[in-house]
Amino acid sequence: MRVHAALLLGLCLIAGAARAGMFDDEEARRDIAALRGQVEVNQKAVEERLARIEALVQDRSIELAKLIDDLKQDLARMRGQIEVQANQIDTLDRRQKDLYVDLDARLRKLEASAQAQEKQAVSAPDPAAEAKAYEAALNQFKLGNYQSSVAAFQNFLASYPDSQQVSSAQYWIGNAYYALRDYKTAIAAQQKLLASWPTSAKAPDALLNIASCQAEMGEAKAARDTLQVLLKKYPGTPAAEQAKQRLAGKR
């Protein structure tokens, strides 16, 4: 009886243990299922979040590409505007230079015209006064006032530089110095006449006067050379005839 009771008790314990094991196994399965569900939920949430991020990145990539394209277009427009402005600046610079050249040419013309008008405005020398001044200087020479004659002829040259009598006035200055026995100054005065007015009617007389000065200074050879130059350059003139006579007399 006791053995039977013990067996019965053992069987009850084994059954209880079995029921307890079954309970623990089901609970574990429920926990695993719950975890799997949670994992799936989390995975789905992660996938959705990744999808949103990818969409956002793609949208922003499109926006960035559009922004870069817009910037390129703006840069191209700016370059075009800069080229247009550079061409306009070059055009303006050329116009400005042309304007300066034109203004300079006009100013030069105006200055030349003004100078011409000023010259026309200046009263022409009085022919009567000119002739009177020349005669007065020559009369001083004829009177033997050689120094006064030199001063008078020099004043005449300063007052009437365009006169037809300038070469004659220069000749009489040299002749007056010859009369004063200042032969070097006389030669210099006549050489000035020959250099400034070589075609003057007084040029042969100037050479003859130089030869006279050279002869007075004892430069016989130089005097003969001057007379020969006179014969060569101004043949047929009264001064040339005198040169012939002097050369014939010296042979």
Image (tube, rainbow, N blue to C red):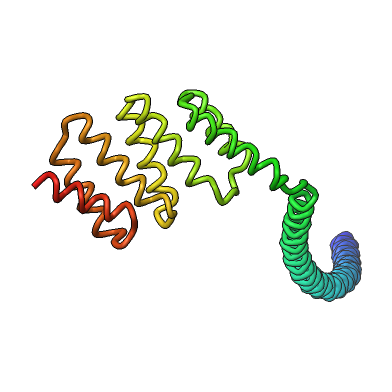
Q: In the shown orientation, is residue 202 left or right of residue 74?
A: left
Q: Residue at x 52, y 24 (%)?
A: 148
Q: Is residue 47 visible?
A: no
Q: Residue 81: x, y in percent?
A: 81, 70
Q: Residue furthest left?
A: 251
Q: As displayed, is residue 102 above or below residue 72?
A: above
* Residue 151 seen in render: yes
Q: Residue at x 33, y 55 (%)?
A: 238
Q: Nearer the viewer, residue 213 or 62?
A: 213
Residue 233 quadrant: bottom left
Which picture quadrant has residue 51? bottom right
Q: Nearer the viewer, residue 211 or 111?
A: 211
Q: What residue is rendered at 89% in x and 65% in y?
A: 31
Query: Is 128 rendered above or below residue 188?
Result: below
Image coordinates of residue 184 in percent, x first then y, are 30, 29
- The answer to whether 68 is drawn above or below residue 223 in the figure is below
Q: Is residue 200 above or below residue 219?
A: below
Q: Is residue 219 left or right of residue 213?
A: left
Q: Measuring from the top left, give residue 50's x and y in whole percent.
A: 84, 70
Residue nearest the viewer, comparing 75 with 161: 161
x 35%, y 31%: residue: 178
